[in-house]
Image: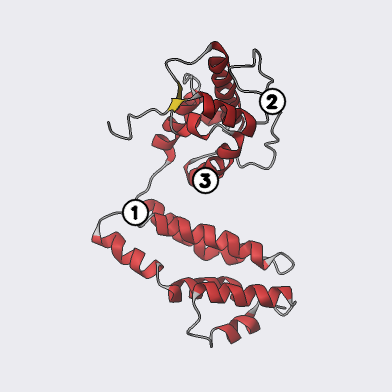
Amino acid sequence: MSSSTYSPVWSPDHIVYSLTMSHYNLSCTTRDRKSFVKPAPIKLDNFEHLERQTNYEDWASQMSMSFRPMGIYDIIINKMQPALNATDEELEAYEALANHAMLVLIQLISKPIMKKISKLTTPYEIWKALRETYYHNNVFSFVHQVPNLCSLSTQLEKDKSVVDFMEKFNDQWTRVCQMTAGPDPYWKKFRAFLEEDYANCNFLLAALSKHYPNPVDNLTTKSNLSYTELKHHIRALASNSQLG
C-alpha cells in the first residue's frame, strides 16, 4: 500500500500518550476511565496565521513543530484513525483530540482562506487542501526564497541577539536547500553549491557585515573555517561583547 493512501491506526497506547501530551488530566488508562477532561486552552497569540501562498511554508513548518507536543500531529498530517476494535472511551478520546485539532487549525487561518475550506470536515482534509493549494516546491518558489535569505540582514538590529539571528538564518538556509532536493541536474548543481561550507559562511558573513563590519572583516581572513566553527567564533564574540 502506498504511503499516500495509508492511514495509521489510533491505538489505545497512542491515545494515552496523546492525551497526556495534550494536557489531559488522566491518571489511568483509557480502558479504566469513563470520561475525559477537555484539553486546557493553548495560547495561540504568538503563532503566525496563514494569509497567502507566500507565507505558507513558514506557517506549515511552525504548525508541524507545534502539533507534536499538542498530541495532534498524526491526526492532522497522517490521517490517523481509531482502531476498528476501539472502545467507546477510546473513540471519545479520539474525537476530543480531533475536535481540538480542528479548533487549532481554524484559529490560525485567515478569513478569506477559511471561506475556501469551510466545507471540509476533518483536520486532515483541511491540512491536505491547504498543502495542495499553497505549497509549490518548484523553481519559482526557489527563486522567491533566495531573496528572502539575502534580505535577512535588514532584519538584524544591533541591539538584538545575534545568536537568535543565526538561528533564523539557519532556518532560511535549510529551507532553500530543501527546495533543491529534486532529481533534475539543474537542482543538483544548486544543491552542491549550497552544501559548500564556503558558501554558507559567506552568506552568513554578508548578512552580518552591515552591523558588524570589523568583526566580519577579521573573520573573512580565516578562510579555512567550517560553518560550524564560524558560528562558534561569532557566539564567542557575542558572549564577550566583542561584536560591536
Q: CA distance from mark 1 to mark 3?
A: 20 Å
Residue closer to the observer: 19 or 187: 19
In the rendered structure, the answer to whether residue 35 lies left or right of residue 12 reads right
Q: Name the amino acid, label 3.
A: Ser
Task: Give the mark count.
Answer: 3
Q: Are marks 2 and 3 in contact (CB under 8 Å)?
A: no
Q: Which residue is mark 3?
A: 61
Separation of disc 2 and disc 1 at Cα? 51 Å
Which of the two labelled residues, at mark 1 and mark 3, occupies the earlier sequence position?
3
Observer-nearest residue: 171 or 92? Answer: 92
- Quarter of the image with the C terminus is bottom right
Residue named by callout 1: 139
Circle nearer the viewer, 2 or 3:
2
Dividing the picture into quadrants, the one containing residue 22 is top right
Q: Are marks 2 and 1 in contact (CB under 8 Å)?
A: no
Q: Are marks 1 and 3 in contact (CB under 8 Å)?
A: no
- For label 3, the SS is helix
Residue 32 place in picture, x, y as percent: 62, 16
Mark positioned earlier in the residue sequence (2 or 1):
2
Q: In the picture, which quadrant includes the N terminus?
A: top left
Colour scheme in use: secondary structure
Can residue 241 be seen here? The reply is yes
User: How packed is label 2: few (under 14 Cα within 10 Å), some, or many (20 or more)?
Assistant: few
Residue 186 at what x, y percent from top left?
27, 61
Amino acid carrying label 1: it is Val
Displayed quadrant of residue 164: bottom right
Which residue is under mark 2?
Answer: 27
The residue shown at (57%, 28%) is 101
In this image, 244 relative to 89: left or right? right
